[in-house]
Amino acid sequence: MSSLTGTVVGKVIKVPHIVHGKAVFGDAVEHRSRVGDLFLTPKLDLDALVRPRSEPGPAFEVPLREILDLLGETGRRLNLDTNPHLAEALDLISASSRHSRRVVENTYRVIGQTFEPGALGYQVERELGPGVIDGWVPVYKPNAPSCQVRAFPPRLVHIMAGNGPPAASISIIRGALTKGINLLKLPSNDLFTATAILRTMADIAPDHPTVRSFSAAYWRGGDEAVERLIYRPQYFDKLVAWGGEATIRHALKYVGPGFELVQFDPKVSMSMIGREAFCDAETLERVAGLAAEDVNMMNQEGCASSRHQFVEGDVKEVDRYCAALARQLAVDRFWGDGKIWKTPADIRDTVEGLRFTGTHAVFGHYDGRGLVVRSNEPVDFHPIAKTVNVIPVASLRDAVRYASVATQTVGIYPRERKAEVRDALANAGVQRVVTLGSAIGLATTGQGLPHDGFLPLQRLMRWVSDEESE
């Protein structure tokens, strides 16, 4: 295999770094992935990965229009059939990931759509306001001296998520739109998507300021010998962290004056299904199919994947729904995985015990094609590998009490009933309400909308005012 983005030798994988837009290869350091595979990286050159504040970022003064043009061309070049970096990344991830080649390939075939410049221009205007990223914009206050404001480019370290390739494109797009300096910490469960995208950008315009604004490297998460040197305000403004509770708590150790944490917390999602689903057998099967769509992303690894579903009806009706959901989970879908993840042993053992309580019912099997557990209250275990917990409720409003600040997305059927519960869900801490079946989609559907309860670009920028400017 040629060394375009890396090399597989047996089960040993060579991972390149990106330093200011240029690929760096080497095999000086050994690491182990989450699935136990050995991979090699170049020696980490910390001096090369940071830029002092005395040196402005390459893209600080680049017009947004030029950046959108570059991102648009990047999206067009991210064609799996013609892009060698993306094709090899697919081979490398397939050799080392828990996901099947088919799931990663399906994702790669649509990843270019997230770079559509019209949607990205809307995202900037919606999240920041017109003109404020390209320079100083007048702000008029009644009976007060004139003032100007600028959304100034930041210096960002990204602790990236690796539970699906879209996380890499989202991080790169946001970093580019801020015009800032970006250091991407590659996740061990996706070492190649980000570097493939960055190398594609470099093929288009190797000297473009946005290309030179990006570096990407791997070090073991929590390695204080690296992080205590990098996570400093003299180099970076913000740490943008995706991940579980342990990742976020570790990142908090470095927060201090001049160095801020922007966190995308661990989340779970759920579904709320009204009794309208039971109007006839055809509707019930269709609704179960929509609910299965909201479960299936990357075998339920995504934060938006539904894990608990609250169904308005009596036990007999809800059991009919559970049987339909188990059938629909077994259907081969876009996000489904040919590399079946069997139900984890701890969940299997717990469910076997629940069968004899008289208050639970089990549908499906432990073969990874879909398992549904009906209970009176949410189960204590964390549903994963296409496992869904279904809870009967007398009213959708009764399901609201199970939502919290840890709930990211709630999918609701029918659409007309969202208005009935959305304020109560927001009060409980929910960040996103969607129509059942649309919790998971292309990243473009969320551009310009809140993510985890805030507007990401607005949070990433450094907001600076020039007061009494005239």
Image: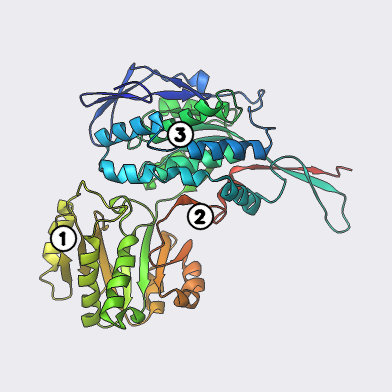
Give the amino acid at mark 1. Thr
User: To which residue does mark 2 refer?
Assistant: 446
- Which kind of residue does numbered mark 2 sit on? Gly
Residue 217: horizontal and vertical position, in percent?
A: 43, 27
Quick one: quadrant of the C terminus? top right
> Residue placed at 43% from the left, 26% from the top?
226
In the picture of the structure, the residue carrying the numbered disc 3 is 197
Instruction: Judge whether residue 254 can be spotted in this image.
Output: no
Q: Relative to 3, is 383 above or below?
A: below
Q: Residues within 10 Å of mark 2 (few under 14, many from 20)?
A: few
Q: Which residue does the numbered mark 1 point to in the structure image?
A: 350
Going 25% across and 33% down the picture, which residue do you hit? 95
Q: Evaluate if marks 2 and 1 touch, with contact meaning CB atoms under 8 Å apart.
A: no
Say whether residue 252 is left or right of residue 314. Answer: right
SS at badge 3: helix
Q: Quadrant of the N terminus?
A: top left
Q: Nearer the viewer, mark 3 or mark 1?
A: 3
Asked if 325 appears above or below 47 in the picture, the reply is below
Q: Give the alpha-carbon distance from disc 3 to disc 1, as whole Å.
A: 42 Å
Q: Which residue corresponds to the image point at 55% horizontal and 54% vertical from the top-left?
A: 454
Secondary structure, mark 1, is: helix
Q: Position of residue 116 (x, y in %)?
A: 54, 46
Instruction: Inspect the image, locate mark 3, and give the three-letter code of the amino acid beneath it.
Output: Ile
Cα distance in 3D space between marks 2 and 1: 36 Å
First in residue order: circle 3 vs circle 2: 3
Of tags 3 and 2, which is closer to the observer?
Answer: 3
